[in-house]
């Protein structure tokens, strides 16, 4: 008489397991519209080229002043230079050793090293050609995007923060969450959060128009056509200093932006800005294993 084969049964779920809801299904939404994506990538390429060609233009005279006039004997609030093989940066009279990064790097005595500049060998004329050409690439698509954003109400609907978002408690909460790398999930991730909106507002309403206007102020032709630009900025040297500061602000925005993309999940974020489709990150279930 043969023995009966043992019967294996799935273990019954515990009370805690049976009470847990099923994991939420993945939700793909169309979050980034085509004009936004086109303008984003146009700007991404343009800003990098303008920053790099701008650094080569700065190399021609690596001093910054305030006021109408500026020459080597005048007070300079910023100077990037070298003494022999030692590179230095002098900021408001305080000198920092920047050998290997600024002033003298890789055996080359240049304020900004060739790895950061367009062209990579010293040429003020070529750098100006790159800079001025891509200035048009920055301005013309920017004006078209601004028109589209106004007509479709994208600016007011998606970019400008609402009054309740600017409440101190809301701002403090969002700042704390981002500092802890806890980003919005679920329905809250459908739209830009208040910190993103504020950053984009600074770019759209401060950095971009400021860079364009100060750039125009440094042109003798534009000074003759629009002398009010010199009055507005208090002189060409002040305009040059503000231009440099705003460009540095743009570089800082790019660094923070890229860091946030990596922290939030680069695949999902890059897919959104290429295809428009974005996967809503789901909140972690309470009691779920990490």
Image (cartoon, helix red, strand yellow):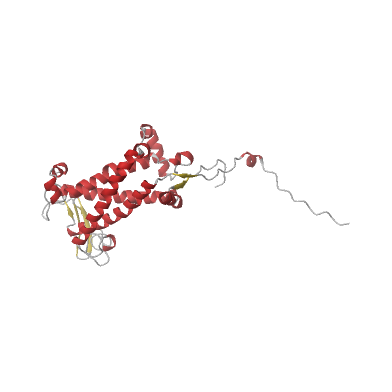
The percent coordinates of residue 99 (x first, y second) are: 26, 61
Whole-percent x and y of residue 102?
Answer: 25, 59
* Quarter of the figure that contains the N terminus: bottom right
Q: Residue at x 39, y 47 (%)?
A: 34
Residue 253 as seen in the image, left or right of residue 182: left
Q: Nearer the viewer, residue 223 or 20?
A: 223
Number of on-image labels:
0
Q: Is residue 225 above or below residue 173?
A: below
Q: Is residue 253 left or right of residue 238?
A: right
Residue 58, by quadrant, is: bottom left
The structure residue drawn at horizontal position 21% and vertical position 58%, both measured from the top left corner, is 129
Residue 193: % across, % down: 40, 40
Q: Is residue 249 visible?
A: no
Q: Residue furthest right?
A: 1
What residue lies at 28% left-to-right and 56% top-to-bottom? 49
Residue 134 appears in view: yes
Residue 178, above or below 71: above
Q: Residue 126's image quarter?
A: bottom left
Q: Is residue 238 left or right of residue 158?
A: left
């Amino acid at each position: 008489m043969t023995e009966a084969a043992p019967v294996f049964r799935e273990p019954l779920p515990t009370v805690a397991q049976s009470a847990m809801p099923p994991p939420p299904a993945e939700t793909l939404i169309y979050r980034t519209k085509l004009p936004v994506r086109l303008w984003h990538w146009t700007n991404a390429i343009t800003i990098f080229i303008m920053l790099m060609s701008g650094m080569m233009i700065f190399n021609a005279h690596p001093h910054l002043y305030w006021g109408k006039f500026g020459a080597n004997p005048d007070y300079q609030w910023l100077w990037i230079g070298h003494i022999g093989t030692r590179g230095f940066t002098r900021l408001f009279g305080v000198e920092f050793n920047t050998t290997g990064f600024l002033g003298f790097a890789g055996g080359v005595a240049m304020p900004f090293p060739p790895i950061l500049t367009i062209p990579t060998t010293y040429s003020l004329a070529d750098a100006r050609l790159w800079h001025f050409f891509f200035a048009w690439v920055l301005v013309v698509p920017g004006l078209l995007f601004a028109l589209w954003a106004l007509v479709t109400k994208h600016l007011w609907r998606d970019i400008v923060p609402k009054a309740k978002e600017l409440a101190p408690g809301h701002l403090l909460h969002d700042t704390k969450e981002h500092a802890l790398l806890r980003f919005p999930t679920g329905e809250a991730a459908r739209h830009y959060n208040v910190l993103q909106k504020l950053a984009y507002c600074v770019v759209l309403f401060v950095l971009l128009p400021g860079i364009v206007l100060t750039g125009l102020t440094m042109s003798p032709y534009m000074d003759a056509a629009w002398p009010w630009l010199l009055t507005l900025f208090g002189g060409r040297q002040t305009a040059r200093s503000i231009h440099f500061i705003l460009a540095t602000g743009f570089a800082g925005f790019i660094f923070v932006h890229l860091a946030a993309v990596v922290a939030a999940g680069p695949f999902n974020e890059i897919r959104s800005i290429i295809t428009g489709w974005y996967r809503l990150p789901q909140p972690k279930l309470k009691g779920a294993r990490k």
